[in-house]
Amino acid sequence: MIDRDDLGSWLEGPKIEREDGDWPGRRLGLPETGSHSLAPAWRRLLGLMVDWFMCLAIANLIGSSNPFLAPGLFALEHFLLVSTLGYTVGHRIFGIEVRRLDGHVPGLVKALIRTALIVLVIPALIFNRDNRGLHDLAAGTLILKR
């Protein structure tokens, strides 16, 4: 009998085959595990959720019915904190940080590019074999474990 596994689906996407001894970040000269290795997707997602729900809570406390208040607060928080400190509240809680490829804090321009693309959502859902989203590729940034 033919089942779903036999047919496959375009939703599954291409299989990313890794050679023995390969890991996300190796091509960038990053360690496989530990401090300054690429952060796993679950930490990034949970950090994003903390930031988003925090901004929703603040918007609700303000009591405005403006539908752009929470996304605006999220963008402002992300831009200000990533450009100056290299992490958001959610990043800090989950032990991750945003860095340029040279290891420094992103700064204003890279943080602005990254924030603009994250607010659009879709670029953050598309990533390469080093688990870097389009927003990180466009801004020249990485999310690393602290």
Image (spheres, rainbow, N blue to C red):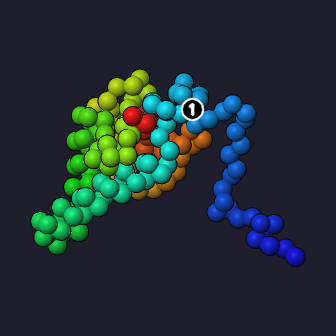
State the image quarter where residue 35 is shown.
top left
Q: Which percent across, then down, holds residue 113? A: 34, 41
Secondary structure category for the residue under label 1: loop
In the rendered view, tell whether residue 91 sits above or below residue 23.
Answer: below
How crowded pointer 1 is (Cα within 10 Å; few <14, some 14-19, many 20+) is rated as some
Tell me: 92 left or right of 15. Answer: left
Q: Which percent across, then down, holds residue 14? A: 69, 52
Quadrant location, the C terminus: top left
Tell me: 112 left or right of 121. Answer: left
Q: Residue furthest bottom?
A: 1
The answer to whether residue 109 shows anywhere in this view is no
Residue at x 12% of width, y 65% of height: 62
**Residue type of the residue flagged with mark 1:** Glu
Q: How many marks?
A: 1
Tell me: 26 left or right of 106. Answer: right
Q: Which one is nearer the viewer's eye here, 8 or 57?
A: 57
In the rendered view, tell whether residue 113 sits above or below residue 32.
Answer: below
In the rendered view, tell whether residue 80 sits above or below residue 5.
Answer: above
The answer to whether residue 121 shows anywhere in this view is yes
Residue at x 24% of width, y 34% of height: 84
Q: Which one is nearer the viewer's eye here, 19 or 128?
A: 19
Q: Residue furthest right?
A: 1
Q: Which percent across, then down, holds residue 123? A: 45, 51
Q: Which one is nearer the viewer's eye here, 120 or 74?
A: 74
Quadrant location, the N terminus: bottom right
Q: Which percent across, then down, holds residue 9? A: 70, 65
Residue at x 41% of width, y 23% of height: 102
State the image quarter where residue 96 is shown.
top left
Residue at x 57% of width, y 43% of height: 128
Q: Which residue is mark 1?
A: 32
